[in-house]
Amino acid sequence: MGKQLEVEGTSYEYDEDSGVWCRTGGKTIWHIVREARQKGKDARKEFQEYSRRVSQAQEDALK
């Protein structure tokens, strides 16, 4: 089992053989977009910001 990480309700596991993070549960892209639309926000911008936060958390977890 690789490193595990949870970011804003979505869990990920790092696969050391392939060197990638895999989503193992929680929010999907659709959830992020739907929540943004319900709040009257720009869905594309909200997803980009969410992706940035997830990427940063994943980088930090590998340090």
Image (spheres, rainbow, N blue to C red):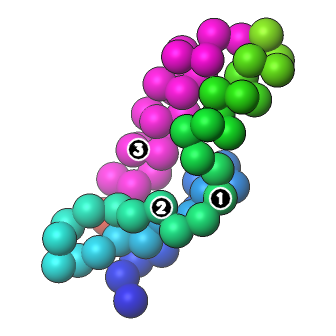
Give the CA distance from mark 1 to mark 2.
8 Å
Residue bounds of the magenta highlight: 41-61
What type is the residue that disc 3 sits on?
A: Gln
Percent from the top left, x then y, of residue 43?
61, 17
Q: Is residue 5 visible?
A: no
Q: Earlier in the sequence, mark 2 or mark 3?
A: 2
Q: Check disc 1: other Cα within 10 Å, few if <14, some if 14-19, many if 20+.
A: few
What type is the residue that disc 2 sits on?
A: Arg
Give the CA distance from mark 2 to mark 3.
15 Å
- Up-down: is 50 above or below 27? above
Which numbered marker is on residue 23? 2
Residue 56 magenta: yes
Which numbered marker is on residue 37? none
Q: Residue at x 35, y 71 (%)?
A: 14
**Quarter of the image with the C terminus in it:** bottom left
Which residue lies under the disc numbered 3? 56
Q: Is residue 59 visible?
A: yes
Give the CA distance from mark 3 to mark 1.
18 Å
What type is the residue that disc 1 sits on?
A: Gly
Percent from the top left, x then y, of residue 58?
39, 55
Q: Earlier in the sequence, mark 3 or mark 1?
A: 1
Callout 1: SS: loop
**34 to the left or right of 19:** right
Which residue lies under the disc numbered 1? 26
Front residue of 24/53: it is 24
- Up-down: is 8 above or below 5? above
Front residue of 3/29: it is 29
Majority SS type along the magenta span: helix
Front residue of 58/43: it is 43
Q: Residue at x 58, y 47 (%)?
A: 28
Q: Residue at x 48, y 45 (%)?
A: 54
